[in-house]
Image (cartoon, rainbow, N blue to C red):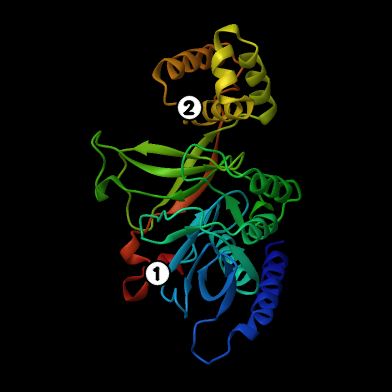
């Protein structure tokens, strides 16, 4: 089974490399692709499946991080979940990069906002949908807001048909970043790892005080709660007179998100109003005590290998990533 799977990966990888070959106009030059940015064509280099650098013209040197989705880490064997090996999921990161390089995509800047690395934040809807629908990427919002509807729809389609990274398991949350407490924590003495929901793409922080060793595999143990259980609990809360105003304010889909988080994580995000948060938490604890939010069974969810940024590239790159 593993041999056949590896052969299929190699064939797909080779096909994408070959179809990307025209972009290699000059030997040794970075493979140039084209994006249409605010209506104007730009030559760019995709260093991975969700970011690029402009190669020439008035915007030469501009670096962009694409919003709404996330591809797996391309610096090495970092991810693991379900029946996949770390190497197989690493291939999906490479496939995402090649897929981005072989197309012509339409991008726009919705603001002047930049990420923590100084990259412009752009939205390329056609690329985002294509990467997600192939199972080469997952929907991601960097906060508690759900992902864009068109992207969530594309992901649900990919999951339904077990495409790409979803073929051998779908965790409730994808672990996308690790932070060891040895790097420094916040004012509360804690740091966090980012978890991204496969239900709608919103992010939740896994707060902790753990110190990780170099190349340690860190896995999130998620509570096993079927969606049908979450939907039933959400309906119960929707009909609760005490929550009528809150449900009207946040909407049924956001309530479903919070119920899912509480059931599977043990906490929920996205509700800043303290009285409302306290009330909803009390109602959720009541449902949990009544056995209406599933049992206590846990499973091995998404995993990542801990490697500090400075040891991911170049001469300092550690061997566990190979």
Q: Position of residue 8 (x, y in %)?
A: 72, 69
- Asked whether, in this view, residue 214 is left or right of residue 58, the answer is left
At mark 2, the secondary structure is loop
Count of marks overlaid on the render:
2
Residue at 54%, 91% in the rendered image: 26
Give coordinates of residue 56: x percent, y percent: 47, 80
Neighbour class for label 2 at 10 Å: few (<14), some, many (≥20)?
few
Give yes or no for contact between labels 1 and 2 (Cβ–Cβ under 8 Å): no
The one nearer the camera, 64 or 172, is: 64
For marks 1 and 2, the one nearer the N-term is 2
| Outermost residue to the right | 161
Q: Is residue 205 above or below residue 93?
A: above
* CA distance separating discs 1 and 2: 36 Å
The image shows residue 163 at horizontal and vertical percentages of 71, 55
- Is 65 located above or below residue 297 in the figure? below
Residue 306 position by quadrant: bottom left
- Is 159 in front, or is 54? 54
Q: Nearer the viewer, residue 161 or 32?
A: 32
Secondary element at image label 1: helix
Between disc 1 and disc 2, the foreground one is 2
Q: Is residue 74 left or right of residue 95?
A: left
Q: Position of residue 67 (x, y in %)?
A: 52, 54
As drawn, the label of residue 273 is none
For label 1, the residue is 319
Residue drawn where x is 63% and y is 21% of the image: 234
Which part of the image, by quadrant, shows the N terminus?
bottom right
Answer above or below: position of 57 versus 100: below
Alpha-carbon neighbours of circle 1 within 10 Å: few (<14), some, or many (≥20)?
few
Q: Which residue is mark 2?
A: 266
User: Which residue of the protein is positioned furthest toward the top in this rendering?
Assistant: 241
Q: Residue at x 53, y 62 (%)?
A: 50
């Amino acid at each position: 089974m593993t041999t056949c799977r590896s052969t299929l990966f190699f064939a797909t990888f080779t096909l994408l490399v070959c179809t990307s070959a025209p972009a290699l106009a000059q030997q040794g030059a970075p493979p140039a692709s084209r994006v249409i940015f605010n209506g104007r064509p730009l030559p760019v280099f995709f260093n991975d499946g969700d970011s690029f650098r402009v190669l020439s013209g008035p915007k030469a040197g501009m670096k962009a991080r694409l919003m709404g989705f996330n591809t797996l880490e391309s610096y090495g064997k970092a991810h693991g979940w379900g029946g996949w090996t770390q190497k197989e999921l690493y291939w999906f990161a490479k496939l995402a990069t090649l897929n981005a390089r072989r197309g012509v995509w339409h991008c726009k800047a919705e603001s002047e906002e930049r990420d923590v690395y100084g990259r412009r934040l752009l939205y390329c809807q056609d690329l985002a949908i294509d990467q997600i629908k192939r199972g080469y990427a997952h929907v991601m919002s960097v906060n508690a807001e759900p992902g864009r509807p068109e992207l969530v729809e594309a992901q649900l389609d990919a999951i339904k048909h077990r495409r790409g990274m979803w073929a051998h398991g779908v965790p409730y949350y994808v672990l996308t970043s690790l932070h060891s407490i040895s790097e420094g924590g916040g004012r509360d003495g804690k740091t966090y790892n980012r978890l991204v929901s496969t239900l709608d793409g919103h992010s939740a922080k896994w707060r902790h005080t753990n110190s990780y060793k170099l190349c340690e595999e860190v896995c999130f143990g998620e509570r096993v709660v079927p969606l049908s259980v979450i939907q039933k609990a959400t309906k119960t809360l929707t009909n609760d007179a005490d929550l009528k105003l809150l449900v009207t304010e946040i909407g049924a889909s956001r309530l479903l998100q919070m119920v899912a988080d509480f059931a599977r994580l043990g906490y929920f995000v996205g509700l800043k109003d303290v009285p409302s948060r306290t009330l909803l938490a009390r109602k959720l604890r009541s449902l949990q005590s009544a056995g209406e939010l599933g049992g206590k069974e846990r499973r091995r969810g998404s995993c990542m290998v801990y490697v500090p940024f400075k040891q991911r590239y170049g001469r300092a790159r550690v061997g566990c990533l190979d």
